[in-house]
Image: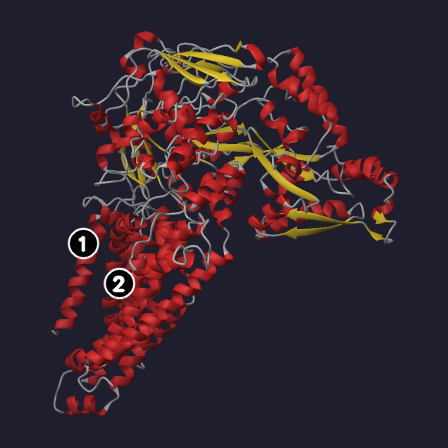
Amino acid sequence: MGKGSSVVRFAAVALGLALLAACTNNPYPDADEELKILYRPLGEPPRTLDPAVSYNAAEHQITGIVYATLLDYHYLARPYRLIPGLAREVPHARTLGGGRVAYRFQVREGALYQNDPAFSLAGGGALTREVVAGDVAFQLMRIADPAIASPVVATFAKIEGFREFSDRLTALREGDPGFASQSIQAQYAAAGGIAGVKAAGRYELEIVLSEPYPQLLYWFTMPFTAAVPWEAVEYWDGEAGRAFFKDHPVGAGPFFVTRFDRQSRIVLDKNPNFYGLRHPEWRAPAAVYPSEGEPEDAPLGRLDPAYVGRPLPFLDRVEFPIEKEDIPTFNKFLQGYYDASGILQESFDKMVHEGALSEEMARDGMQLEKSVDPDVYYIGFNMDDPVVGSAAGEKGRKLRQAMSLVVDSTEFSRIFNNGRGVPAQSPLPPGIFGYEADYANPYRRVDLARAQRLLAEAGYAGGTDPKTGKPLRLSFDLGDTSTRGRVRFQFFVNAWSRLGLDVEIAATNYNQFQEKVRKNAYQIFMWGWIADYPDPENFLFLLWGPLAQSKSHGPNTANFANPRYDELFLRMKVAENGEARLALIREMRAILERERPWIELFHRENYTLFHGWVRNVKPAGLSLPTARYVDIDPGLRSRRRAEWNRPVLWPAFALAAGTLALVIPGVVTFLRERQ
Amino acid sequence: MLAYVLRRTAYGFVTLIGVLLLLFVLFFLYASPHEMARRAVGEKAPPEVLEQWIVNHGYDKPKLWNPEAPLDTLLVEHFRRALTFDFGRSDADGTPITQRLREGMGPSLALAVPSFVFGLLFSVALALFVAYFRETYIDRMGVILCVLTMSISTLLYIIGGQFLIGKLLRWFPISGFDASPSVIARFLMLPVLVSLADGLGGSVRFYRTVFIEEGGRDYVRTARAKGCGDLRVMTHHVLRNSLIPILTRVVVAIPFLFTGALLLESFFGIPGLGSLTVDAINGNDFATLRAMVFIGALLFIGAQIATDVSYTLVDPRVRFE
């Protein structure tokens, strides 16, 4: 036998042995089977876990449980309600002179950060330290720091002295090239801190705003304003083998990062220093399982006495494997290796029948949870445009109304989204104060006859432009050139063509589209908005005159300006939720209904599948980190996985036998003939 | 020989400069830093934050000509970084690119080396086998199978493999990666099998042709006439004399071991350099993408030179000119 064939034989034997040894589809080590681990796949690796920068729902799933914030949302209550987190209570606004407003937070005494080598910087070989008010002040200075490039500077610029601090810091850095090499704490101290952020003593923090902005409190539930220890920022600098701070978060939340393989998995373990675990006697609202919720929560098992009032978190570990492709993710969910999953478009009909879980899936113990995202997707008109905008007066208004009357959002969701999506009647989605389920916008139902009438009244009878004698030509400007996008946009163009209008899709890449928007060279566009916090202000500001794109490069891309709306907005913004605020919202809604700067399309609806071993699941439309409330039954999971994943080996033997049966006669005959 | 290698290296260097120029045109003249900034800091970020990001990442410098400081331009910076292997930081998340390359190299090699070695061994062995049985039904069946397997796209192998072996037969995990020695094999099995299935058809057909052509030469007849056995003829004479085309195919494939398999790594969740490249494309991380393209070009040019040199090692008749 030659050398070549022995190599081949060795390779075949090695491969065969390795095949047998590795024959399991379980992607986790066996030892993990008994632990309470929640597996949540991420579609892409997190860019940054720096809470001042991260502005992405997936990253917030991690930063939201690593960092502790002063406030939190009640897990079960809807509409969303603020509860104290690290703060002792939710502060109330105190009016100061000159329209200024102040909020005073009392930070709990005795809350600790996770153990981390960074704390040795303070000396004495410490592993952790107490959370103090100054840590939140430090984080606010980081947001103001231009070198950090935080995406939320504009929001916090309402804090007195915020911009000034930022300018002083820039001037110091530009004035002395050596300044930036000092410690970050020293730099901020030299710049004098933010005037409107005052840490009085160790546990009191006062925020002074130059104008009333009650929505500020919502920002104190987000990792942007979490308590961040300066030592961590200083220590984790990417030098001498240390990670960067953005890859090594250090917080006081219920979990802490124990493994960070950006491209493959991020593992978080329960933080024994978390105030909920160290001080269960505090009964801190954000650190015990709630005892009250919505009426449907009890029947759905979300108020199980086994959990109510118990200190959080319940899980031992949360793992975020990076799983870039949808198909493997979904298949691994079906095998029991992921605990929750969205539904693949292709598998939708198999999973869901008439809005409920299919029998087959229900038999396996799966649960289907639906939630409506706090967002709105819409087609907007550029109100600065001479044809569709306000300059066209009544004519333009009737044209917009007519175009709104032929767009069928329900049909759109049915065709492109398996029927998922709540048709939007106004900018406000369900779950947000001011949303009224029984409100039906008269211009958001399909009525071709009325639309044709309005179009004729606008002077475009049958869609014809009297100037040219041809169908009125309009441009639908879009920042998406994909085929998938084009098919969707065509749906709207077809709807308008029923009115005789000739709407041309002008699709460019997103960047060129942005350029068009900057130059105010667009007519009709399509866009969406996802709320940062559950307040009507976060939607209705999208149509507030002073934020018009053409005037201030603001988010009001429709360039809508209506003096009455603008005035109502200012009153609504500072009003407490209640009848008076609702009345203001109704009047604003009526203006939008008539003026039609937008054709409201839909609010996205999420269908999420959970396995039966996951407890206390309540879908939140907002990107809320919910892992601290969730529990797992590892025994049930283990049994199910074993049941669902027995390897089927006979095809391998059949294939080998078949190949041999096919080849051997040929070999034998050939050799015999050669003899 | 030295003069030849030097000359080839010089040609390679010129090609490399061309690659760098092309990269500059694509990534600096055509692409807009605003798009990268928006992707990096988020859709909702106000314009001043985008501008700040652009300044922080050095994209605000003059592109080609700076009258105040002629060396302080994007063009000079681009060449300096590439030629000193100081690739800077990722546009997407600020991580040093060399650190990313270091991290990604291991998983890429863990997948590519077994795929490459087993792929080569199996395809040469199978090609020898079918060439030996040429003009029998084994040979014809082999060729038909090769053409069939070549006609299927890589993506279908991947999705089909995941569906059949991962989902229906449940032999290996559908995707994922863990470098710990106790479990790494189970994650690599399926992608290696898919990679073998994907590459085998083309290679076997190519090597078969080479072996058959070589098998018809005079020295083979002489060897047989002298009483040399079939197996010895195939493995000692035919295989050895076919090394030049085999080397051409093999050495050129080596750079791709390092740069990683784009689709395979992405679908199987292997955190290698292929996956890194896909992320860079999806995330407008042009700095990483530039580094990957440059390294790919460099390795490819290196492999071409190595191929030429290796010819003389396997065939003393080949001389440098």
Residue at screen point 66% across, 28% down:
A544
A97 and B251: which is toward the camera: A97
Q: In this rendering, do the residues under marks 1 and 2 share a single chain?
A: no
Question: Please, is residue B50 above or below residue A577 in the view?
Answer: below
| Residue at image coords 38%, 50% | B267
Q: Secondary structure at mark 2?
A: helix
Q: Position of residue B34 (x, y in %)?
A: 51, 47
Q: Quadrant of residue B221?
A: bottom left
Q: Residue furthest top?
A: A281
Dot 1 falls on a residue whose secondary structure is helix
Q: Position of residue B264 (x, y in %)?
A: 36, 55
Q: Position of residue B97 (x, y in %)?
A: 32, 50
Could you say which disc has been placed on residue A17 in the image?
A: 1
- Residue type at mark 1: give it: Leu
Q: Is residue A358 above or below residue A13?
A: above
Tell me the crowding category of disc 2: few under 14, some 14 to 19, or many 20 or more residues within 10 angstroms, Cα based.
many
According to the image, label 2 marks what residue?
B116
Residue A439 seen by the camera: no
- Is residue A157 visible from the viewing direction of this image? yes
Q: Could you tell me which chain the residue with mark 2 belongs to? A: B
- Residue at the image point whose x is 34% and y is 26% from the top: A66
Location of residue A173 with respect to A138 vertically, above or below: below
Label 1: few (<14), some or many (≥20) within 10 Å?
few
Left or right, B78 with reference to A466 = left
Q: CA separation, marks 1 and 2?
A: 19 Å
